[in-house]
């Protein structure tokens, strides 16, 4: 086999993470190739970050808003803070510079306890931003028209790494355990299931082959095991829109939901989320059905923002989503909302 063919086979199995780190060795030459990897490249790039890589990471952070990524490099400002909380310092840096800032409320108190002293006479915005968030071990990214300060896992997904194939010994273990899934002894069945789950995701293709010839009880067990072993991608918190924004509604319901696009000024301080959202949707003449997360205490300042944008920033940080049902805005966990819409 030729060296070129060997290289081609290697690259074919290369994960996005490995590819991003390989390309990061020469970010100038590989600039376009890195960008083509998309947001999934950000977290592995953070592991190998270096000054010449930062502009490319910023381009990935901002996606189509290349103008904003560029301004972080080209806009230089004097900046001075003393014993300032990280969240406060970040807001001060971007105040009046066209970058609305959102500090993730689930980490706001923690990072505000981290104090920073920073003084630069003429530094790029991006350098200052990175210096501030690095102090608290967090990151910033661009989501829904705002700079969001939070942890990397809440901003960007991590590409799934394919599991290594089972060894011959593991395959034999799998085959033996599978024959015991419909054993008369409950203890034997349970142990067989545990043995199969212990083999991990790589067992899935082998279990799928056994399904076709399995009898009803064993087939049901195999399907259940495959479902448990199938990886569920961890979606970043700040990603998709609210369900209500893409939900098909008609007639009077459509008119009601359209009211959430109204822009208002809305400020609140230390209210329960249920109370805050009740007051918010009332601005559009709507009612709220709060199924989860209502006890969270929130503060918010929104000026000339749409109601749906405010609904987003008040719910999404807490793993919540919103949809329209029976004349009300229903707020529940992401999983419950997805399930409810699937049944509609």
Image (cartoon, rainbow, N blue to C red):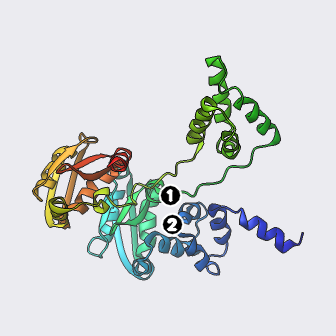
Instruction: Locate residue 23: give its quadrant.
Output: bottom right
Instruction: Locate residue 16: give its quadrant.
Output: bottom right
Measuring from the top left, give residue 1's x and y in whole percent: 90, 69
Is 75 above or below relative to 84? below
Q: Is residue 209 visible?
A: yes
- The secondary element bearing badge 2 is classed as helix
* Mark 1 crowd level (few <14, some 14–19, many ≥20, 10 Å Cα): some
Left or right of 158 in this view: 113: left
Measuring from the top left, give residue 17's x and y in whole percent: 62, 61
Measuring from the top left, give residue 40's x and y in whole percent: 54, 63
Q: Nearer the viewer, residue 79 or 320?
A: 320
Instruction: Locate residue 102: give its quadrant.
Output: bottom left
Measuring from the top left, give residue 39's x and y in whole percent: 51, 66
Query: Residue placed at 34% from the left, 68% from the top?
Result: 80
- The secondary element bearing badge 1 is classed as loop
Pointer 2 residue: 39
Is 7 above or below relative to 200? below
* Mark 2 crowd level (few <14, some 14–19, many ≥20, 10 Å Cα): many
Q: Nearer the viewer, residue 340 or 287?
A: 340
Counting labels gives 2
Q: Are marks 2 and 1 in contact (CB under 8 Å)?
A: yes
Is 222 above or below relative to 45? above
Q: Nearer the viewer, residue 155 or 221?
A: 221
Which residue extends farthest right?
1
Q: Is residue 260 visible?
A: no
Left or right of 153 in this view: 177: right
Pointer 1 residue: 157
Query: Residue placed at 70% from the left, 44% from the top?
Result: 209
Left or right of 20 in this view: 248: left
């Amino acid at each position: 086999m030729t060296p070129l063919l060997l290289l081609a086979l290697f690259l074919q199995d290369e994960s996005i993470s490995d590819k991003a780190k390989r390309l990061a060795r020469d970010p100038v030459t590989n600039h376009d190739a890195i960008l083509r990897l998309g947001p999934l490249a950000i977290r592995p790039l953070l592991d190998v970050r270096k000054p010449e890589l930062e502009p490319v990471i910023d381009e990935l952070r901002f996606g189509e808003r290349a103008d904003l990524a560029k301004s972080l490099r080209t806009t230089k400002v004097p900046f001075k803070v003393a014993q300032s909380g990280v969240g406060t310092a970040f807001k001060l840096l971007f105040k009046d510079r066209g970058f609305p800032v959102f500090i993730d409320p689930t980490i706001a108190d923690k990072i505000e306890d981290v104090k920073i002293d920073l003084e630069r006479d003429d530094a790029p915005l991006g350098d200052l931003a990175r210096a501030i968030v690095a102090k608290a071990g967090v990151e910033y990214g661009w989501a829904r028209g705002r700079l969001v300060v939070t942890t990397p896992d809440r901003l960007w997904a991590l590409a799934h790494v394919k599991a290594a194939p089972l060894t011959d010994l593991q395959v034999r273990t799998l085959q033996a355990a599978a024959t015991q899934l419909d054993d008369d002894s409950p203890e034997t069945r349970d142990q067989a299931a545990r043995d199969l789950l212990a083999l991990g995701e790589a067992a899935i293709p082998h279990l799928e082959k056994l399904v076709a010839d399995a009898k009803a009880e064993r087939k049901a067990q195999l399907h259940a095991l495959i479902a448990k072993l199938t990886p569920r991608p961890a979606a970043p918190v700040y990603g998709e829109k609210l369900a209500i924004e893409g939900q098909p509604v008609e007639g009077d319901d459509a008119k009601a939901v359209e009211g959430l696009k109204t822009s208002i000024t809305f400020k609140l301080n230390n209210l329960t989320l249920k109370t805050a959202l009740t007051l918010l949707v009332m601005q559009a003449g709507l009612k709220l059905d709060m199924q989860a997360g209502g006890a969270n205490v929130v503060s918010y300042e929104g000026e000339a923002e749409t109601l749906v944008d405010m609904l987003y920033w008040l719910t999404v940080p807490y793993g919540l989503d919103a949809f329209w049902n029976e004349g009300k805005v229903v707020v529940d966990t992401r999983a419950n909302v997805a399930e409810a819409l699937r049944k509609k």
